[in-house]
Image (tube, grey):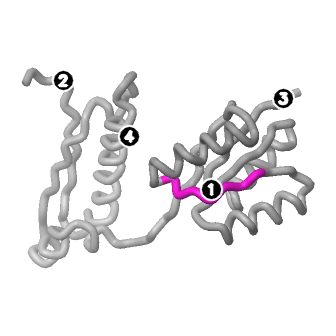
Amino acid sequence: MFRLDGKVAFITGASYGIGYAIAKGMAGAGAKIVFNDINAELVEKGLASYKADGIDAKGYVCDVTDEDAVNKTVAQIEKEVGVIDILVNNAGIIKRIPMCEMKAVIPSMIKKGHGKIINICSMMSELGRETVSAYAAAKGGLKMLTRNICSEYGEYNIQCNGIGPGYIAK
């Protein structure tokens, strides 16, 4: 049987939804649950849900896009609950915005009836390496942006390619 007794599990954005379900499962396996959300109202709603499900969870208000806030929250969790054994990076907000509202060139390309966008990705769009995690995440995101531009604007004859060069000499 899978057990997490005594483990501290920090699930980001776990007031509801997928994060909440993951936390509930981990609590069922014996983990101590800590979670965050972006504002006090969501944290309070989450705490009420955990309590209703018989889970003793600790909630923290923390915007995961604020590095200082994250560092303070982790320090507070370590002080109040213990060192985090399991981190689930779940927090995320989806905003449905057409790409043409984010990339200034697309509306004119649509009017013209064609266009080409070239994104310089990287080998790190596909591979992970030590000490380059932020770069690899950004380049992986750029690869997905390339795919999204293709799916959203291919019908307007707008082509988007991602190039993934390897290491180059300076």
Disc 4 marks a residue whose amino acid type is Ala
Tag 2–tag 3 contact (CB < 8 Å): no
Residue nearest the viewer, comparing 159 with 1:
1
**Residue 8: horizontal and vertical position, in percent?**
74, 36
In front of the other: label 4 or label 1?
Answer: 1
Amino acid residing under circle 2? Tyr
Alpha carbon of mark 1 to alpha carbon of mark 3: how far? Answer: 24 Å
In this figure, which residue is indicated by the disc labeled 4? 137
Q: Nearer the viewer, residue 19 or 112?
A: 19
Relative to 127, does residue 32 appear above or below in the rendering? below
First in residue order: circle 2 vs circle 1: 1
Q: Quarter-wise, where is residue 37 in the image?
A: bottom right
- Which image quarter: residue 95? bottom left
Q: Residues within 10 Å of mark 1 (few under 14, many from 20)?
A: many
Contact (Cβ within 8 Å) of mark 1 with mark 3 = no
**How many residues crowd mark 4 within 10 Å: few (<14), some (14–19), many (20+)?**
some
Distance CA(mark 2)–CA(mark 3): 43 Å
Circle number at residue 13? 1
Give the left or right position of residue 59, taking residue 70 as reference: right
C-alpha distance separating marks 4 and 1: 20 Å
Magenta span: 58-64
Residue annotated with mark 2: 167
Residue pointed to by mark 3: 2
Secondary structure beneath dot 4 equals helix
Give me the C-alpha separation between circle 2 and circle 1: 37 Å
